[in-house]
Amino acid sequence: MKIIDPASWNRREIYALFSACDHPFYSVTFELDVTNLRRFTHENGLSFYYSLAYLITEAMESVEALCIRIREGQLVVLDTLIPSCTDILPGSDCFIIVTLPRGTDMAVFCRNAKAQALSQQTLFDPAMEVRDDLIYFSCLPWFPITGFVTERNLDVNDCIPRVTWGKYQNRGERFVLNVTVEVNHRTVDGVHLGTFYEALQAGIDRL
């Protein structure tokens, strides 16, 4: 973890601009080619949902802006982020929130997340959900989405990214998925989301 000096930060004027906003949050939706991810998860018996959460977390960790948090007026850059994923168990229509470290192995993460989901007796782990080093994930697998806005308590210091996607769609020989990312404009600009998108797509293409 490192601390940003606002006086020498190249975004200091942008940070000040959006710090004056009552609602500094915005969301974007982009199309992701998940053809390789769909194939890889099918071949290896992995959860598409948890695999994508793993890859998104990995890609976000590579972009400093997405790792910034505001703590007691200080700008800090975190070294790692933790996926916090909604999930619905078979036979239920109530979701739970599964939160656990990403680790370094996608298959292990998927197995651990599924095991935790099956054993978890509460909606969420209160000790984990008070953290600010999270990424909130949600999925609506029943239909494609073209945009999404999440609920929140209005806290202008909240820098936790929210990521949502729906059902992927077949387009010829490819499969595409619309992904919505909601961030705080005090710390994240469009260029940073562009870098994140490129890192994420590259990670999928390498599978």
Image (tube, rainbow, N blue to C red):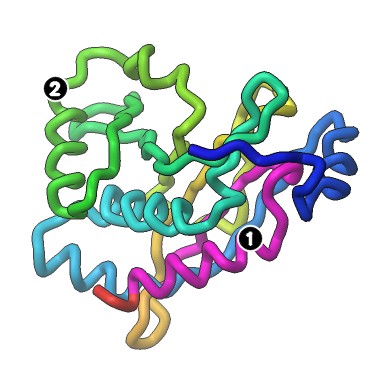
Magenta span: 176-204
Q: Quadrant of residue 202?
A: bottom left
Please name the residue shown 47% across and 32% down the image: 133
Q: Which mark is residue 119?
A: 2
* In front of the other: 171 or 53: 53
Q: Is residue 193 magenta?
A: yes
Query: What quarter of the picture does the C terminus occupy?
Result: bottom left
Residue drawn at x 56%, y 48% is 66
The type of residue carrying mark 2 is Ser
Label 2 element class: helix
Badge 2 vs badge 1, beta-carbon distance below 8 Å: no
On the image, the x and y values in percent for residue 29 come to 61, 59
Q: Nearer the viewer, residue 176 or 153?
A: 153
Compute the Cα span from label 2 to label 1: 37 Å
Crowding at dot 2, Cα within 10 Å, few <14 / some 14-19 / many 20+, comes out as: few
Indicate left or right for 95 with 166 as reference: left
The answer to which quarter of the image holds residue 96 is top left
**Horizontal relation, residue 6 to residue 87: left or right:** right
Tell me the mark number nearer the camera, choosing from 2 and 1: 1
Name the secondary structure under disc 1.
Answer: helix
Residue indicated by mark 1: 192
* Residue kind at label 1, given as amino acid type: His
Name the spot of residue 13 as percent of width and height, x first: 88, 48
The total of numbered circles placed on residues is 2
Q: Position of residue 168 (x, y in %)?
A: 39, 64
Q: Quick check: 127 above or below 40?
A: above
Would residue 188 be seen by someone viewing this image from the given angle? yes
Label 1, residues with CA under 10 Å away: few <14, some 14-19, many ≥20: some
The residue that appears at 42% across and 20% down in the rendered structure is: 129
Residue 202 versus residue 115 in the image, above or below: below
What residue is at 43 percent from the left and 59 percent from the top? 59
